[in-house]
Structure formats: structure tokens, C-alpha cells
Amino acid sequence: MSAGTDQGSDATDWKTRREQMKALGMQVLWNALQIADDAVRSDVELYAKGIAHSKGFTVYDLTRAEPFGAESEEEQQRCVDKALRAARYIDLRGDIFPWHMVRVDGAGHMVRFINKEPAE
């Protein structure tokens, strides 16, 4: 085979490999998005301070950390950051979840979850 043929084959192989990597990257991103969608509500519930509301539901304070294992101020701030990031993600994704996250009593940092009614 001549050098020109080898280079053409290498270019074709590289193009195929690049397309495969791009497809793999899209699969990884799609899976990451699905994992984030599945876990985002539990991130708020886990990291934000849960408070019993007088009307019988739980409200999550996005500015306060749940104390489970977050004893230092640095650990508490990491929990608050995770809860805030999760709430921003929910806002950005829009109305795609089987529940709504709503702000409580006009406070932007106090949220609760309401399950959507099943379609009949």
C-alpha cells in the first residue's frame, strides 16, 4: 500500500472514531440528565433543613442545612450549596417532573413539593 492510502485510511478511522466519541458523549450526557432528574428532589429533601409546617406538610429551608453529618460550618455550607443548586436545577428544567416545587409563604428560600394529580 502507498503512503497516501494509509493516510486516507487513518483520516477515515479518525473521523469514525470522532463520531463514535461524539455519540458516546451524547449518551453520557443523556444518562447524566436522567440521573439528575431522578435525584434532584431527594437532594433538596436530604440537604435542606426540613421543617414541619402548621398545615401538616414539610417545608424545606434552602438556606439551612439538615444536620445529618454536617457538623462544621464548612460542611453545612456544602449542604446548603447542594440544596440551592438542586432547586435551581428544578426551576431550570421546568414542569417536567411528576410533582411541583412551590415557594411557601412568599419566601423564595422556603419550598415544598406537591405531587401532581394523576391524569384520568
Image (spheres, grey):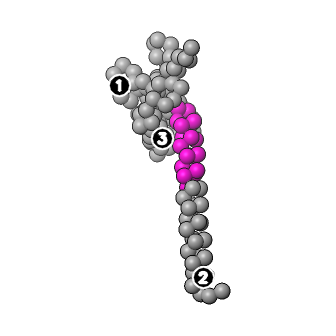
Q: Position of residue 112 (x, y in %)?
A: 46, 23
**Magenta-drawn segment:** 25-43
Question: Does dot 2 land on a helix, a strand or a loop?
Answer: helix
Q: Is residue 30 magenta?
A: yes
Residue 32 sits above or below residue 46 on the image = below
Q: Is residue 62 left or right of residue 120?
A: left
Quadrant of the rendering where the C terminus is positioned: top right
In 3D space, how far apart are the residues under numbered discs 1 and 3 (Cα atoms)? 19 Å
Query: Callout 2, which amino acid?
Result: Thr
Residue of label 1: 107
Asked whether 94 or 77 is in front, the reply is 94
Q: Position of residue 52 (x, y in %)?
A: 49, 18
In 3D space, how far apart are the residues under numbered discs 1 and 2 (Cα atoms)? 68 Å
Residue of label 3: 82
Mark 2, residues whose alpha carbon is within 10 Å: few (<14), some, or many (≥20)?
few
Residue at the image position 45 percent from the left and 29 percent from the top: 95
Asked whether 115 or 68 is in front, the reply is 115
Residue of label 2: 5
Earlier-in-chain disc, 3 versus 2? 2
